[in-house]
Amino acid sequence: MKVTCLFVDMNSYFASVEQQDDPLLRGQPVAVAPVMAETSCCIAASYEAKRFGVKTGTRLSEARLMCPGLVIRPARVETYVRYHNKIVEAVNSVLPVKQVHSIDEMSARLTCEQTQPDHAMLLGAKVKQAIREHVGEALKCSVGISTNRFLAKIATDLQKPDGLTLLTPEMIPERLYSLALQDFPGIGSRMEIRLRRAGIFTVEQMYQCSEAQLKRIWGGINGNRWWYLIRGHHVSESPTRKRSVGQSHVLPPEFRSDTGVRAVMVKLIAKAARRLRLVEYWTGRLTIQVQYYDHGWWEQSAKFPPCQDTQSLLEVFTRLWQRRPQGPAYKPLKAAMLLTDLSSGHSTPQSLLPSDHKRCEVSKTMDAINNRFGRDKLYLAAMHDAHTAAPARIAFTRIPDAIEFDFHPLSDEFVGED
């Protein structure tokens, strides 16, 4: 019997970083919010706050009622990334990190004698100790060990917080039966509906399905992959392809106006365009969205010849923005944008117009200047009113690169991708 993957999942990561930075917060209920407004929501909660029902997505106004004495701190993106880098270093001091999956998750491959369960469990204990000693005692993690990364990640959820769990083939499938379907990474609300329509309501029922049944339910080869993964087999992962580059921002009170939301949207598009150039992709569609109080979401989208320069994207935005609902009844709450129809540089037909080449060169030159001297030292005049809009945000699914933060010489993009 051998195990091949060790998975590290930090517990209540953002809130734990706040508790590590401020010892007075340790043992206290803590929540982290992107914007310090009562209509904003929690993006993280400490275990002390979770005991009162506070969780990711809980509105601040509701969280205060649910948890008396709750301490709410604004998100500090650069701090979380700095701690992330320290955690990676700590894990690397025990065994090499093979892949970083998110701001609070990473995995390592086990080889040779490490694949023996006893040895693997010893390494897991050493990883936890290294994080505690080299990063901070308030930063707890759950470590899962199994025969593939999928099950190793699930093992981390079997004991939280501060767990160390071994999941061997002999323990499968019974150890999985206590989980809900949505406890499995990759089964969201839509997938659960499809499973229920097929008569599958429990993990045990899913496990008893044949390979062909799961293929029909998933509608393709992913069903085959799941059949093997939940049985502990190693399945080669297909290389991921970037499908979208997106930005969203909950508006602080001072930007909850037609002028304010436009300023934020311009800043979001400029940041997304910069990220697009960083990863050397081109886009052919822009979608913009605004959520209004009492009026729900407004959305517009447009296709165009592939581009990656900021000016072209802002021109498309300007045309779309003219269609927005207007009037005192439309008070904006949130702005979002998405670039899709992406293609890599080597597969994108290049424009023959000199003006298009000039726009690309201008954008890349501005990127180089800002990378060297600091974020937004140079920007388009159209962004002037948006200069202070949309400060740094972060998602669990991507760790920003060094050039992406406010502190010199970094910037503050956040990009979501599939």
Image (tube, helix red, strand yellow):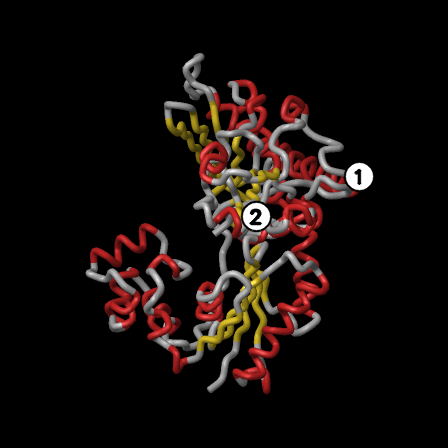
Secondary structure under tag 1 reads helix
Secondary structure under tag 2 reads strand
Q: Is residue 253 left or right of residue 325?
A: right
Q: Is residue 20 left or right of residue 11?
A: right
Q: Amino acid at mark 2?
A: Tyr
Percent of width and height locating residue 344: 55, 51
Q: Tags 2 and 1 in contact by the CB under 8 Å rule? A: no
Badge 1 is on which residue?
373
Q: Is residue 215 left or right of residue 31?
A: left
Residue 303 to residue 238: above or below: above
Whether residue 265 is visible:
no
Distance from disc 2 to disc 1, alpha carbons, whole Å, reads 24 Å
In the image shown, does 365 or 252 lie closer to the viewer? 252
Badge 2 is on which residue?
281
Percent of width and height locating residue 298: 40, 27
Residue 309 found in image quarter: top right
In the image shown, does 244 or 298 lie closer to the viewer? 298
Percent of width and height locating residue 55: 46, 46
Q: Amino acid at mark 1?
A: Phe
Furthest-right residue in this view: 373
Q: Residue, x 51% and y 38% (percent of image)? A: 68
Percent of width and height locating residue 320: 46, 25
Q: Residue, x 42% and y 30% (percent of image)? A: 300
Whether residue 129 is visible:
yes
